[in-house]
Amino acid sequence: MTQTTALGVQYGPREGYADDVTRELVLELHRGMVRIRLFEEHAGKLVESGDMPGFLHLYVGEEAVATGVMSVLTDADQMTSTHRGHGHAIAKGAQFRPMFAELYGKTTGYCKGRGGSMHIGDTNKGMLGANAIVGGGIPIAVGAAFASQYRGDGTVAASFFGDGATNIGAFHEAVNMAAVWDLPILFICENNGYAEFTAQGNHMKLEDIAERAASYGIPGVVVDGMDVLAVRAVAVAAVERAKAGHGPTLIEAKTYRYFDHQGIKGMRIPYRDAAEVEAWRERDAIKLLEVIGTERDLVSAKEFADIWSQTEAEILEAIEFARNSPEPDPADILDDVYTV
Amino acid sequence: MTTRELTYVKAFNEGLHQVMAADPDVFLIGEDVAGYGGVFHMFDGLLTEFGPKRVKDTPIAEQAIIGLGVGAAARGLRPVCDLMFMDFVGVAMDQIFNQAAKMKYMFGGGVSVPLTITTAGGGGMSAAAQHSQSLEAWLAHIPGLKVAMPASAYDAKGLIVGAIRDDNPTIVVMNKKMLGMKGPVPEELYAIPMGQANVVREGSDVTIVAIARMVVEATKAAATLEAEGISVEIIDPRTVQPLDTDTIVTSVKKTNRAVIVHEAVEFGGIGAEISSQIQEAAFDYLDAPVARVAAPFSPSPYSPILENAYMPDAARIAARVRAVVGRG
Ligand SMILES: Cc1ncc(C[n+]2csc(CCOP(=O)(O)OP(=O)(O)O)c2C)c(N)n1
Ligand SMILES: [Mg+2]
């Protein structure tokens, strides 16, 4: 059943979309989401216990968005991320060891300890980095999409950003330009209902951000961001459209972050109530996929449980690796400022 | 006059409360400044005291935040527009340097822009390349702007009040690492005018001109050096635009040596300007070349080990002073 908003935006598939789902796909998507969930929970605890430096914006609750979209991209497709970027990186293929090493500021990290949480990513896997400037990545993804079109190599770009980011000028300029030039790009708005501590209703008049697409003359799609199969389905359609030369799609995934804007535990002033958090947790994306997988006899509960425990073990090993990795040498501080 | 110990951020906050109570034309906008009181507590309690007409949360839209401030200021209001992290001036730069800074001059003096921009700069928190910068030289380079950098609780209060009362676009750069530092602060409302340096400590062998949190590091270095028989005078310019060259030059004429310290990268930093001013006005008094202690020419690294090496500290300052007085 599809729904349509007042401005004609189509809600993404909700029923009947997953009839052709395979066991392999369920396993892949499940593992992908669990990898993010456990990575984030461990990282959050390590920072809050003082073991790891810096501060983190955790992606727990939103795993289905990165996992669903990235499951249709290849390493050659380019992606830009946000301050909340660990999930995007892991979904795009980043490995635990250099991820944790980066958060520990070690030489074995993806950015050699230079970037940390807010700049994490594997440039060899089509990541143009996490970004600490809200909206900063959106025009960059448009540039990557321009390069795809210019080279005619059949690749696409994907840009992830939050609900709050759609209020910044860079979003408007970038999406419009991509639309005008029919660039092969997916704009994925992760609408978690808040920009920091400001609820969506206080930072914009719209309920469905996908409606903004109409002002650029491109399709806007709303999708349940807690349903990885639904996210994947709209991403498939958007990639097809992009590769066919028809230009961008704005995908709005309705989702929720379970933890605070920064770190796990709530900061000093409550800005959302516990019931709201609980209600979203009830619709957890990983739980939903486990239900679908077991109900359809594609994957057993035991197999799902094994994914959790295997991933946990892999993470603990990666944390040890990161802890034991060498610290950067201050003598090298000027390396990589310029390309030489 | 009653004076208490307040934290740097509380002193700033008190100044804002008092100046808003005194002047109904002052209002505050920015991201999460109202309901949340700002991510650094800088704006705690203002919404409760002054209500949603005068204290407003904005969408994430730095260009519009500053632009709105410019327009409202041109109409005679006294906006305080917050940019959270100093790095975000980049997003709003057109409104800051092409618009706010130039309106008075471009329009033949016809309009004033009594806009105050608040933000937090500086490193030391593993916040990496886009959340740790000290960009004061960039801003001080623009005719029409003023740039204040409080280095004590007393100055945090006095400079935010002074900035709001100033009839020009003024940026008050709070330092993230100083937020919890305490110091004596008078209860009543007072303003520190732009362009008045503070002689933080008197001495006779060398002048350290220190910017923002580097005043704290220089003070630590001065104590160490004193035990070694080196007497250090410390000047905090408080505002880098306008720059109180007179106070700096007077000090250097007395001590005959100068070391300039800032967190920003050395190349093209405000230290280059200060050094140039000193040698132009006091060349014959100098017993040693003017020295600088500042960050190397790279973005701010994330790793604590790299960041510690990146940021000047008391030990590096002391070592430089020893070299300058010939005891290195
Ligand atoms: C240009 C800019 N302005 C403000 C900030 C501070 N900031 C960091 S995250 C954030 C909220 C972003 O909200 P949203 O886009 O919805 O992403 P979410 O955090 O919800 O994932 C803000 C205001 C920033 N990093 N960059
Ligand atoms: Mg959000």
Image (cartoon, rainbow, N blue to C red):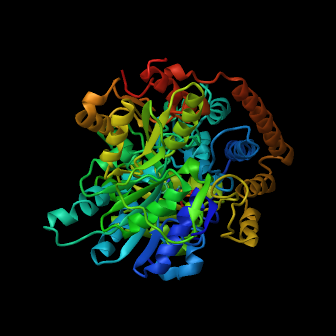
Q: Residue furthest left?
A: B108
Q: Tell me residue B24's x, y (percent).
A: 43, 82
Q: Tell me residue B164's x, y (percent).
A: 40, 68
- Side of B115 relative to A1 (left or right): left
Q: Tell me residue A73's x, y (percent).
A: 52, 42
Q: Can residue A120 be seen from the camera position used here? A: no
Identify the image quadrant of residue B275: top left
Decide: is B147 above or below B227: below
Residue drawn at (69%, 63%), measured in percent from left and top?
A: A268
Q: Tell me residue B189's x, y (percent).
A: 50, 71
Q: Which residue is at the front of the view, B299 or A56?
A: B299
Decide: is B188 above or below A153: below
Q: Can residue A216 be seen from the camera position used here? A: yes
Identify the image quadrant of residue B44: bottom right
Q: Residue furthest right?
A: A302
**Which quadrant, please, contains the N terminus of chain B?**
bottom right
Decide: is A60 above or below B134: below
